[in-house]
Image (cartoon, rainbow, N blue to C red):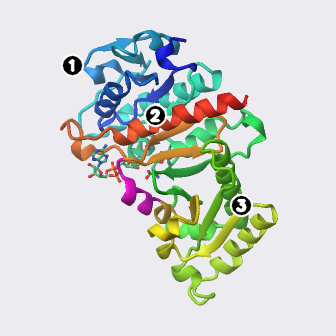
Amino acid sequence: MAAHCGPHAPLALTMGEPGGVSAEITISAWERLRQDGICFFIIADPSLFHGTTITEISAPDDAVAVFQNTLPVLPLEHSIAAKAGIAAPENAPAVIESIQRAVSYSLAGAATGVVTNPIQKSSLIASGFKFPGHTEFLAALTATTPMPNGRVRGPVMMLAGPALKTVPVTIHQSVASAAADLNPDMIKRAAIVTAEALRFDFAITNPRLAISGLNPHAGEAGTLGHEDLSVIAPAIAALNKMGVDARGPLPADTMFHEEARASYDAALCMLHDQALIPAKTLAFHDAVNVTLGLPIVRTSPDHGTALDIAGKGSARSDSLVAAIRLAAAMATKRAAKQ
Ligand SMILES: NC(=O)c1ccc[n+]([C@@H]2O[C@H](COP(=O)([O-])OP(=O)(O)OC[C@H]3O[C@@H](n4cnc5c(N)ncnc54)[C@H](O)[C@@H]3O)[C@@H](O)[C@H]2O)c1
Ligand SMILES: N[C@H](C(=O)O)[C@H](O)COP(=O)(O)O
């Protein structure tokens, strides 16, 4: 492998929603990282990059030789008809093919990990896609591959920013169904996968977890809802018995101020928005969405398709750059453990 790309295979970037900002932030990320010792290629329809010098490659490894000079694009078999600002369900087969191939390359060791560009979930679902997001799709695509080093399988979503890491225990589901589905096993699994990831992927030797309640004021001693006492507290007690440093259930509204954040390494929250609102508010342009508990490395920018600004040249690539850097760092740590 060429020295400027580091010792590992390149990262595979997916195309994401072709009507969104993926192409422009990928070009910008390539410009920012081309001299940085990280290599990647994108699996996409080359027509998305008209006006930019790209190199069409035929295998992941070809990216290494060209990366410093041009963005390597591995063409899809499906073609697209993209218009900036429009997410057309007709492009779904190409969007899905890109994700599937990135995972295949990663499982085969031809790519060192997967960095996904944002997808328009509603558009994919309208075309018949059966998964609510990448997280669940990636878990299905990797379900039969053993986890490395005996680690516990997820998937678990983490939003990782410079000052805060949050994990939603329930992910892409309605608030009503999340509250109904919540059980101690889900909380325990999310906590164990998170603690393992903090140890092995983020080099935090003794990870401390703060676990939120579900209801206002963590249920106010059972007067504002029963789940905090009947579901979350028993999960935390079981985690403590297993040696996991976890405390709670904490009122979600007071666990994210600066002094509170200093007392833990990751906050586990019961609902998607409990976890993602603080993470994106504090660090919208720096935070990274990481899927923990997969046999492959997967990161993503924390933002979505941004259809409202697609093609206008104002989309920032910071979160994608952070996602690429984090994927490379995680892959390096995992390779050192094998
Ligand atoms: N990883 C993913 O695939 C992923 C992540 C989040 C959201 N989504 C999907 O994206 C779609 C749109 O979601 P949304 O509108 O809630 O969120 P969004 O992140 O796309 O947009 C929210 C706001 O942030 C702005 N914004 C987003 N990215 C930006 C960037 N790089 N630079 C500057 N401004 C930026 C947008 O212009 C918009 O005003 C939905 O279908 C959602 O499910 C996908
Ligand atoms: N919940 C995520 C967010 O708002 O950032 C987003 O939907 C992405 O999820 P996947 O990585 O599962 O697509």
Cα separation, mark 2 vs mark 1, equals 24 Å
Residue 170 visible in the picture: no
Query: Could you say where residue 192 lies in the image, as x and y percent from the top left?
Result: 71, 55
Residue 277 covered by magenta stretch? yes
Tell which residue pokes out farthest to the right in this image.
241
- Tell how many labels: 3
79 magenta-colored: no
Contact? badges 2 and 1 (CB < 8 Å): no
* Crowd around label 3: few <14 · some 14–19 · many ≥20 (10 Å): many
Residue marked by disc 2: 324
Which numbered disc flags the more N-terminal residue, 1 or 3?
1
The amino acid sitting under disc 3 is Lys
The residue at the point 63 percent across, 66 percent down is 181
Element at badge 2?
helix
In the picture, residue 203 is in which quadrant?
top right
Q: Name the element at disc 3.
A: helix
Q: Residue 44, position in %: x, y?
A: 39, 23
Circle nearer the N terminus (3, 2): 3
Residue stretch in magenta = 276-285
Q: Amino acid at mark 2?
A: Ile
Q: Which residue is mark 1?
A: 51
In the image, 251 versus 123, the foreground residue is: 251
- Which of 160 and 57 lies nearest the eye of the viewer? 160
- Disc 1 residue type (three-letter): Gly
In the picture, measured across the screen, residue 238 lies left or right of residue 264, that is: right
